[in-house]
Image (spheres, helix red, strand yellow):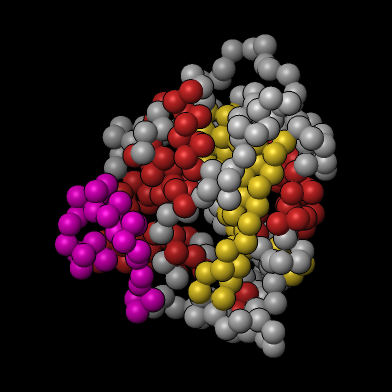
Amino acid sequence: MSDAPTTATHAPLAALDPSLYSIDDEALEFMKSLTGIQDPEALKEHILAVQAEAYAIFPYHCIRRFSFINLKLGRLPAYQLLLTLSKERKGAIFLDIGCCFGNDIRKAVYDGYPVENVVASDLHPEFWELGHKLFRSTPETFPVPFVAGDAFDPAHLAIVPPFYAPPDTPVPQLSTLTSLNPLRRYVSAIHASSFFHLFDEEQQFQLAQALAGLLSPEPGSMILGSHGGRKEKGYRTETGTQLRVGRKGPMFCHSPESWAELWDGQIFRKGTVKVDAILRDSERKYLETVPGVPFGVKSYLLYGVAMINETSSELLMMRL
């Protein structure tokens, strides 16, 4: 979520507004369970304190609008496939890139993904540290390795062609990683939500190339997530999203069709992956609109990209 280019210009910062606080029932119960704070008002004050620290580091709109506390991964159509993969494939490595506080990776571990097979990455290590504060954990109680780095820095994540044959070297120790490059062709699942839409079309292509090089060629390996989308590929039209922190211009969004074409044929060899992508609308009452755009509605593209072979294609359908 927070790997935006640090050199980009952005709109003037808006002050934090506690009246925007909103948490859905699922996230509320999850936060109560992990923090041990059962009183809703006490939990709110705890979240507000961490929000203020995070916003001072890098003022993302998702932090100001409290969307950072609501869970994304568990709502994806492919989530149950991810959990099944963790049970059926020994040592299946799961990477959450642009993880911010680590909400979603914590949810996966909470739901049974083996903590020893999980790794997180973000541009800002401060967010991961604040995640420990938000969830009242420590590196000992939540021992997931965190690898700080810029997804566009080759020293951290270099672009290499996708792999179609299994590796012949030992699996790297996650606890010793200083970059993501040693994970090439070893990662069984990659989660990237609210991440791709931080970048323009060319950067999204480069990011897709880089992530593809990490993915295991074993059938069932997947990349899943969600981000801003449109019915037609292009720039978002809501005036409320024209200039955002970390971006030089309007948000570029893929359509379900262009997203599928990107992965199946441009990133991976045609026919070697199964891509499912749908649009879902989410109300955002703070958005201004232009004629022809429903007031307060923002479309999100939910996706899953899975490696397939001739016998596994039907099995790996995301069934959106």
Determine which quarter of the picture holds residue 64.
bottom left
At 41% from the left and 32% from the top, the residue drawn is: 113
Left or right placement of residue 148 versus residue 40 in this view = right
Main SS type for the magenta part? helix
Residue 211 in the image: state x and y as whole percent: 67, 39
Residue 258 in the image: state x and y as whole percent: 77, 55
At 33% from the left and 56% from the top, the residue drawn is: 26
Tell me which segment is drawn in magenta. 18-44
Residue 128 in the image: state x and y as whole percent: 43, 46
Determine which quarter of the picture holds residue 137.
top left
Give the camera-side residue of 56 and 76: 76
Give the camera-side residue of 88 and 227: 88
Determine which quarter of the picture holds residue 279.
bottom right
Residue at the left extreme of this rendering: 39
Left or right placement of residue 142 versus residue 175 in this view = left
Can you say which quadrant of the picture contains the N terminus? bottom right
- Note whether 118 is above or below 234 in the view shown: above
> Is residue 208 within the magenta segment?
no
